[in-house]
Image (spheres, rainbow, N blue to C red):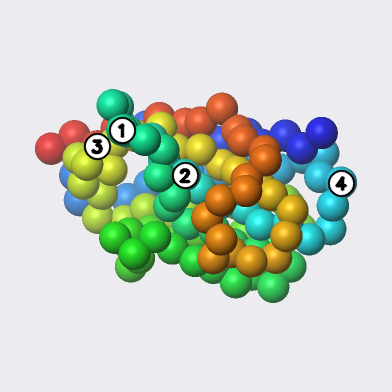
Amino acid sequence: QVELVESGGRLVQAGGSLRLSCAVSGRTFSSYVMAWFRQAPGKEREFVAAISWIAGNTYHADPLRGRFIISRDNANEMVYLQMNYLRPEDTAVYYCAAKQGSSARATNGYSYWGRGTQVTVSS
């Protein structure tokens, strides 16, 4: 059973930076894609970014490209989300997700989810 545990969320001032981490364990398939999603209060969950585990290909949601950067550490089975120039509208619970496959561009089909980490950006 794949387990994903997020960490790093906290209160931060607008304009600041934050790095979220996701620890991956229990993986049983060799080719998979990791992603970050977020859900703001009263809104639907939205895709943030994804990375293919083997090739390291990345795909970022258009509105966030340039501010948010996804990366991974294969050796330590970690996925990161670097968030820069944070805005109050970035306030949300951020979730780590995983699925079998190799394409980071497909934003659906994620089977495994973490419990989320809260990011709050104050103005």
Whole-angstrom CA distance, mark 3 to mark 1, is 16 Å
Would you name the residue on which mark 1 appears?
43
Q: Secondary structure at mark 3?
A: strand
Looking at the rendered structure, the number of numbered marks drawn on it comes to 4
Quarter of the figure with the C terminus? top left
* In front: label 1 or label 4: 1
Would you name the residue on which mark 3 appears?
121
Q: Residue at x 40, y 44 (%)?
A: 46
Q: Which one is earlier in the sequence, the residue at label 1 or at label 4?
A: 4
Q: Viewed as shown, does residue 86 lie left or right of 22?
A: left
Q: Secondary structure at mark 2?
A: strand
Whole-angstrom CA distance, mark 1 to mark 2, is 12 Å
Between residues 89 and 12, which one lies in front from this camera angle? Answer: 89
Q: Residues within 10 Å of mark 2 (few under 14, many from 20)?
A: many
Q: Residues within 10 Å of mark 1 (few under 14, many from 20)?
A: few
Q: Viewed as shown, does residue 73 lie left or right of 65?
A: right
Q: Residue at x 66, y 57 (%)?
A: 33
Where on the picture, by quarter, is residue 21?
Answer: top right
